[in-house]
Amino acid sequence: MAFGWIEEQAEARRRAGLVRTLRPRPAESPLLDLASNDYLGLARHPEVTAGAADAARTWGGGSTGSRLVTGTTELHAELERELAGFCGFEAALVFSSGYAANLAAVTALAPHGSLIVSDAGNHASLIDGCRLARGTTQVVGHADAEAVRKALGAHGGPAVLVSDTVFSVDGDAAPLAELAAACREHGAGLVVDDAHGLGVLGDGGRGAAYAAGLAGAGDVVVTATLSKSLGSQGGAVLGPARVIDHLVNAARTFIFDTGLAPAAAGAALAALRLLRREPERAARAREVADEIHARLTAAGLRAVRPDAAVVSVRAPSPEGAVRWAADCRAAGLAVGCFRPPSVPDGVSRLRLTARADLSGAEIGRAVRVIGETRP
Ligand SMILES: Cc1ncc(COP(=O)(O)O)c(C=O)c1O
């Protein structure tokens, strides 16, 4: 029977307690949200939703074609200019998702004969970029600049290092300055995914590369998503103009994909302008994360010290993590739950996201619920 193996796989997942299901979210949820990536609380900000609605009315429900045909509007160009300027890079290119942006950057910057050095904790979209690229991938230990140096030193041709800036599972930051130094010693490029850094790290949320003094460097490329701090949808690559021009000509997820929807571009642009006007939102998201971590630790829970807005709490087992998250939900709190196989290190955790718009009372309630429901 066609696809007969699907049931076998489903049964194995059931036995391992790893079945995933979709749960549609109502527009007005009574749950306290520590599960979304809306770090700055902008997804439903009136200026952001107005940006989306105005763009849809002006430019239409879709972008009507690939970016190189009819899918580039003046709005896309405006967003790219402002995003590049805000983060301190020469140029930017927006994509239909952060996932597509990562596939583009890695595949287009790692040609045949090149080496890709990839951190073991990288996001799935960077891993898939490595799988699709013509270059050869070498995975190195998590946040290990010395291992990066060694891998680059053993290779003769062009090379690139790819890493998250803030790792999505534990919320820890990559040692960007050390990684950049290792790359420079060997003339390698640095591609970093700032999905969890943009809007949270750096002066006014300008991102991790800006914070590390790497913004605008000729050998540094940043990828980002518009779907987290900017409360919209879509992705971006920022870097030197010659790199961006190369992506326009060589990146398959740019060339063969319909351009970012105008509503998403309009929402992201409105969020970016809001962030520029209200830079304190970035610092507040970090403050909330630190407070959640401090209170969890004081309650005797094992939480990783957050470098940005993600707080990870250890769970005793995959089943324990699932039960814990379900009990939190029953008590009115939405939290993320990470367990194998989405985490390669086999450690199960609750994943909490700090939001700049969480009140002290909400933080207190969240920590109390997590403590009371611990397995
Ligand atoms: C580190 C990281 N990179 C890339 C992505 C993908 O971005 P997008 O959701 O815009 O496709 C995500 C998550 O969504 C992420 O956490």
Image: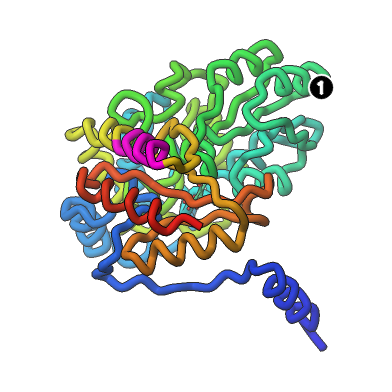
Q: Residue at 26% across / 57% down in the picture?
A: 52
Q: Is residue 289 magenta?
A: yes
Residue 207, placed above or below residue 349: above
From the viewer's perspective, tell me whether residue 76 is left or right of residue 41.
right
Q: Taken as a whole, is the magenta stretch helix, strand or loop? A: helix
Q: Residues within 10 Å of mark 1 (few under 14, many from 20)?
A: few
Amino acid type for the residue under numbered disc 1:
His
Label 1: element kind: loop
Residue 249, placed above or below residue 57: above
Q: Is residue 186 magenta?
A: no
Check the picture and name the quadrant holding the N terminus: bottom right
Magenta span of residues: 288-299
Q: Residue at 74% across / 24% down in the picture?
A: 158
Do we see residue 371 in this rendering?
Answer: yes
Colouring convention used in this rendered image of the protein: rainbow
* Number of marks in picture: 1
* The quadrant where residue 13 appears: bottom right
From the viewer's perspective, tell me whether residue 3 is left or right of residue 363.
right
Farthest residue, direction top: 185
Q: Residue at 59% across / 52% down in the picture?
A: 316
Image location (x, y in percent) of residue 234: 43, 52
Which residue is tagged 1? 155
